[in-house]
């Protein structure tokens, strides 16, 4: 088994700015408390492929509701690897909880972006059965799987990233 990555928390300042942007009514004390409780992703068992991301706060999603979750997490990984993020299987199966971009792709160079490579999850309760999804703080809601990738033999890209969504196509 190759060891190719390490999870880190983003800085408290980065987290506070991103949390406030997402939840503008949050107090500084509340944000500091949420930041303090952030847990780094981990595998549940030795045979697990996915690293569970833990919810930094309580979230309740009625059918059709969407939430953007600043996880407080960034990941440093070897080049030629990517972290693919999915909803936890049980949440998707029981409630049709979906990541809005279907699969989150965290590239190795995202770690060095101006936003510290802060990983977000935007999730929607896509329930067709009127089920309410409750995600308590400190419970797994998303899983990330590291995958090695290759490039074409004629690839000559030398550009570097600075940013998140859409930054590689600007």
Image (tube, rainbow, N blue to C red):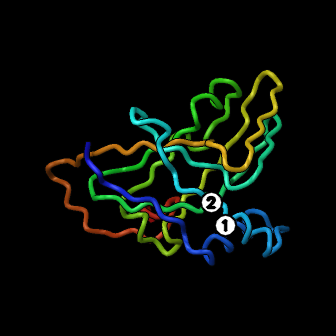
Disc 1 from disc 2: Cα separation: 5 Å
Query: In the rendered view, does 41 fall on the left or right side of 36?
Result: left
Residue 119, position as x, y percentages in the image: 54, 58
Q: Which mark is residue 35?
A: 1
> In front: 32, or 149?
32
Quadrant assignment for the C terminus: bottom left
Q: Are marks 1 and 2 in contact (CB under 8 Å)?
A: yes
> Would you place residue 50 above or below residue 81 in this image?
above
Q: Label for residue 145? A: none
Instruction: Please tell me whether mark 2 sits on a helix, a strand or a loop.
Output: loop
Q: Position of residue 165 (x, y in %)?
A: 53, 59
Q: Quadrant of residue 76?
A: bottom left
Q: Position of residue 62 (x, y in %)?
A: 83, 37
Measuring 40% from the left and 36% from the top, which residue is drawn there? Answer: 46
**Which residue is at the front of the view, 10 or 165?**
10
Determine whether 2 is above or below 164 in the image: above
Q: Is residue 152 left or right of residue 70?
A: left
Q: Quadrant of the N terminus?
A: top left
Q: Residue 36 placed where, x, y %?
A: 66, 67
Q: Which residue is mark 2?
A: 38
């Amino acid at each position: 088994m190759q060891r190719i990555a390490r999870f880190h928390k983003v800085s408290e300042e980065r987290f506070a700015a991103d949390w406030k942007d997402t939840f503008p009514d949050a107090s500084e004390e509340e944000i500091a408390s949420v930041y303090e409780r952030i847990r780094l992703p981990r595998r549940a068992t030795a045979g697990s492929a996915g690293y569970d991301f833990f919810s930094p706060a309580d979230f309740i999603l009625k059918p059709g509701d969407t939430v953007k979750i600043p996880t407080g997490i960034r990941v440093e990984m070897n080049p030629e690897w990517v972290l693919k993020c999915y909803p936890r299987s049980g949440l998707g199966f029981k409630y049709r909880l979906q990541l809005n971009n279907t699969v989150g792709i965290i590239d190795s160079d995202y770690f060095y972006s101006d936003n510290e490579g802060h990983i977000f999850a935007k999730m929607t309760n896509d329930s067709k059965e009127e089920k309410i999804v409750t995600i308590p703080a400190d419970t797994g809601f998303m899983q990330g799987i590291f995958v090695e990738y290759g490039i074409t033999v004629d690839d000559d890209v030398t550009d570097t990233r600075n940013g998140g969504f859409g930054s590689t196509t600007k």
